[in-house]
Structure formats: structure tokens, C-alpha cells
Image (spheres, rainbow, N blue to C red):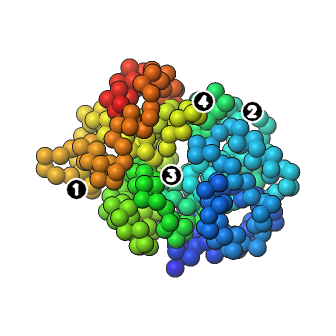
Amino acid sequence: MSFTINYLTRIEFGDDALFQLDETLQRLNIKRPLLITDKGLSSSSIINKVIDASSYVTPSLIYDATPSNPTEAAVGEALETMRRQECDGLIAFGGGSCIDLSKAVRLLATHPGPLRQYAAIEKGSEKITSNMPDLIAVPTTAGTGSEVGRATLITMHDNRKLGLLSPHLIPTTAICDPELTMDLPRSLTATTGMDAIAHCIETYLSPKINPPAEAIALDGLSRAITNIEAAVNEQNDISVRSEMMMASLEGALAFQKGLGGVHSLSHALGGYHDLNLHHGTLNAVLLPAVLRFNESYCMEKYKRISSIINVKVDETPDQFFYNLNKKLNIPTRLRDMGVPEDILEEAAQWALEDHSTATNPRPLDTDDLYNLLVEAY
């Protein structure tokens, strides 16, 4: 059974929500949608699910070269495909990378380049208007929440991974069908799940005042903590997959409060093209160190988090998540992900300039960020 949520955007949620795709295209008057996905999905049987759910999608209207960390170059390629095929709307089908890429494509479809001028650190948010083609986001992972988020993270030509932030970037409609996550490998289920957990924690800890967002973040954290191990170990449980997809959704709905040091650092490291580092894995590895750093500034909130995640008497939240990473077979050190030590100073400087640094509960300078990277290394 699926249901509709109207909160920040229109959300079709449930284990048959994908069947709302044709109706959604008709409602938005999209006749020639460009489907943006990646090679892994386009070469698997799952692509047939979205094609079968829509009479509008054809093989010629598919762009499937989305990188695992979306790049400025890929945005240009997808935009050229959209223009060449005379598409009048977009469907993002995949994980956060496909959805983020689609957001940047819809922006440049109606806004002049270069893309960098719209980055938050370039004070570009005010340049982004609502004049964009409609975007339908269909996530196939439960982690990024990009289907309801106001941000897109794009790696520029110079390796800087920059965030573009605007409520106008939120997809027109999100179609969240947990059936689409059933075939995710265990490793991706784990790392995307930890991505959702990091979102919920960092938005809750952000010093901005937004009690509704905090309530949503805590509910998402509770759902994720209760279900992540079962999602990894019991691949075919649709109720567990549904809970993880809702946790992911809620983490992103709470983004209105901003994020923090975990994301500043993961954005910086995620920009290195040649390393191809997975965002959710980075968040999982960095979370314990950043939690230790912030603890003295968030004592009351840490008590609330501890009660939700059910830490042991002799355990702290950072220890809990370090141990959870081990249980889920996620790397516990940056070196285990192949991060070279000689980039840490540069990454710390990039992290300082990231838009998420401003909403970390404890102020951060370059030395703090470098020390956090060393601690997690």
C-alpha cells in the first residue's frame, strides 16, 4: 500500500509507489522525460521496473553515465542529452548521485553557467530561481534522502565538491518505493543506512533552532537504529526496508537545520576524482571522531541520542557507532578506504570552507578539522 505525503514536496511512499510514475508524469504534463541513472542500474533488470511503470520512458531518453560522485563534466553531458532529445522534464532513478546530478541538470537547463556560481560558498543560493523543469526523484537506496533535500553536491573540475542549496532544488515529486531497495548488496545497505543515521544526528545537533526538524530527525534515527542490522542481514524483509527508506526520507526532511563536521569532511574527501570515495562510508568512518569532538557542547542532546540508540552503561555514542560500523563490516579508518595521508591538510582547508561547517555545534577551525581527519585516519 502506498500513501501521499505533502511536506516540502509531494512524496508518494509505499511498496507499490512506483506505479504512480505515469500518473505523476501526466499531472506534471511531462511528455518527454530524460531518465538519469547509472550504468549499474541500466544494465540490470531493475531498470525494467521504471520503464514498465511509465509509457513515456524509452531507451533513447536515458542518460546512464552518472559517476558515483557526480561531476560537473557529467552534468554537462546529461544536459546536452536533455537538449538534444528535446526533453521537457527529468526522472532521477538511482541513489543520491543520480538525484544530485539531475538537480544540477535541471538548474542549468534554465540558468546560465558556470555551475560553480550557484554554490553556497560562492553565495550563489540567491541566484537560483523556481524557473526549472520538473524533476521526479525515484530513489533506489535508503540513505541520502536527496529525493526531498534542498542540496546537490557536485564535484567541480578542480576536485572541489561543492554544495548548491535552494528550496527550488527540491524535486517536484519523490516516489519512494522500498521494493526498489530489496536487491541492494549488503555493503550498500549498510553504508547508505549509516548515511541516513549521520543525517539524523547532525541535523539534530545543529545549533539552529527548529524543533519540528529535530523531532523528525529523532524519529528517523530511531527507525534507522532499530532496523539497520536487520536490513543488512535479512535482505527480503519489505517492512524493514520500508523503515529504512522512511528514516532516510526523514533525515533529509530535517536538513533545514543544516549538517556539521561529519559532512564538511566527507564532502572535502569525496571531491577527489581519483579516489572515488563513497559518501555514506565516509560519514560512517568520520562520525565517531566528530561525536567525540562535539560532546562537551551537546551534553543534553547526547543524553537523548543515547536513550534512542540504547547505549550500554559504560558506552558513549561515539563508541556505539564505532562498534556498529564493525558489526556492519564497514571500514573503521580512512586508511582502510584508501585515503592517502598526504591529502589531509588540503582536505581540512576545503572542509573549513564547506557550507556544513557553519552549523556544527562546536566551532571548527582548520586545525580542528585536520586533527579530526588524523584521528579518523
Separation of marks 2 and 1 at Cα, in angstroms: 47 Å
Residue that extends furthest to the bottom in the rendered view of this protein: 1
Of tags 1 and 4, the one toward the viewer is 4
In this rendering, position of residue 112 left or right of residue 214: right
**Would you name the residue on which mark 1 appears?**
310
Identify which residue, 4 or 341, lies in the foreground. Answer: 341
Separation of marks 1 and 3 at Cα, in angstroms: 24 Å
Q: Is the residue 162 above or below the residue 279 in the image? A: above
Q: Pick the quarter of the image with the C terminus.
A: top left
Of tags 2 and 4, the one toward the viewer is 4
Circle 2 residues within 10 Å: few <14, some 14–19, many ≥20:
few
Circle 4 residues within 10 Å: few <14, some 14–19, many ≥20:
some
Separation of marks 2 and 3 at Cα, in angstroms: 25 Å
Where does residue 184 sit, x and y in percent of width and height? 49, 62
> Does the residue at mark 2 contact the one at mark 4 (Cβ under 8 Å)?
no
In the image, what residue type sits under mark 2? Pro
Identify which residue, 376 or 197, lies in the foreground. Answer: 376
Q: Secondary structure at mark 1?
A: loop
Q: Identify the mark at residue 144; answer none if there is no mark.
A: 3
Identify which residue, 168 or 39, lies in the foreground. Answer: 39
Where does residue 267 sit, x and y in percent of width and height? 51, 36
